[in-house]
Image (cartoon, rainbow, N blue to C red):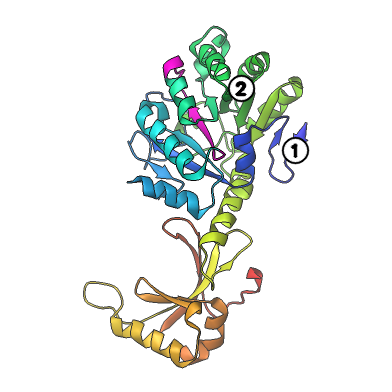
Amino acid sequence: MEYENGSGSFYTHLPHGCRLCYEGAKMVLFVTGLCRKSCFYCPVSEKRMHKDVTFANERPVSSDDDILDEARSMNALGTGITGGEPLLVPDRVLGYIRLLKASFGREHHIHLYTALSPDRVILKELKAAGLDEIRFHPQPEIWDRLPGSGFARSLEIAKELGMDAGFEIPSLPGSGQVAGFARDCDVFINLNELEFSQTNAEALKARGYSAADDESCRVAGSRDVAYSIIRQEPGSKAHFCSSRFKDAVQLRKRLLRTARISGREFDEVTPDGTLFYGVVEGKGERKGGGKGEEDVDGITGMLNGLDVPGQLFELRNDRVELAWWVLEEIAPEIGDRFQSWYEECYPTYGRLVVERIPIDTAVDFII
């Protein structure tokens, strides 16, 4: 058995799609929140669940350009298509696969999750469009009846067409039945650590599940189930994806990729992949909200007067953002004229602010 040190994940086999996730190089394309299943463990948020909405990572999608812009912002080497149930909108899925392959080349790896068992017609269309890998998600009620099922037929057709194929399910009691079937079919199985979310917490608690600790959303025992399965199936192509891996490795590496591409010359990229910079803002509110133009003009005038190079500051949303080390140097000149602070944000769409830090706080941890 191989281990991913420090993340809690372990595996005997990694599908190519997972290898790119380990690099933080996979964009997540959530094509729709619509789904006819009612999996009690589904973690999809209320903002997306049962809603026909599309997101590329955190970016809402209203056009093809939104998808391409997001992929370029992180230099994505591949895309994972998910939902909801993607194959409830097959034309959309096929269109997105063709778009990504045409824009980034055949080497842009695309995998798809589905809880359906598509027939030969749709599988041939997916293959022709360029789908590289398909991951089936049968519901727990049929885990003991997979041989001869629609999933077994879909799996064989996908393999026959030349796609990488396997299963992806949560790691919970009974999942060993799927692992055994995957071994018999010589396909991979991904076991995901079960997690509490706002949308599944009540259902999980009602079934007797509890949190593994007070510091995470991990479900107690989920990792143990996967470890037992992989030990008992030494010849299987199995991978356990931990909750910690998703945050500490996958997300962090994606943020770092995005920050290094989208960060401005004066943004400091932190070890966690966030952006760190300074902010100077006026104190007066103009009618209708926002800061007055005279405040912004005063700030830029002050910076020009102090000979701050133009590439080290930027006017953004009625305020000026600048290099944190510049702010540190000119803080005495700002005095009480304007408001100022250090700011840390995610480099993703919407630039969610993580923290605002007073300018008298040391920032040595950034370097």
Q: Position of residue 218 (x, y in %)?
A: 59, 39
At horizontal 42% and vertical 81% (from top left) the residue drawn is 339
Q: Amino acid at mark 1?
A: Tyr
Residue at x 36%, y 87% (from the top left corner): 298
The quadrant in which residue 14 appears is: top right
Reading the image, the residue beneath label 1 is 3
Q: How many numbered marks appear?
A: 2
Residue at the spot x=57%, y=49% of the render?
Answer: 251
Residue 85 can be seen, yes or no = no
**Considering only vertical position in the picture, is 252 above or below 110?**
below
| Disc 2 residue type (three-letter) | Pro
Quarter residue 288 falls in: bottom left
**Residue 95 position in % (x across, y down):** 38, 34
Q: Quadrant of the C terminus?
A: bottom right
Q: Residue tagged by mark 2?
A: 173
What segment is highlighted magenta in the picture?
107-121
Q: Residue 92 in the image: state x and y as whole percent.
A: 36, 33
* Magenta span contains residue 110: yes
- Quadrant where the N terminus is found in the figure: top right
Viewer-nearest of discs 1 and 2: 1
Tag of residue 187? none
- Viewed as shown, does residue 136 lie left or right of 23? left
- For residue 260, say whether it is visible: yes
Q: Residues within 10 Å of mark 2 (few under 14, many from 20)?
A: few
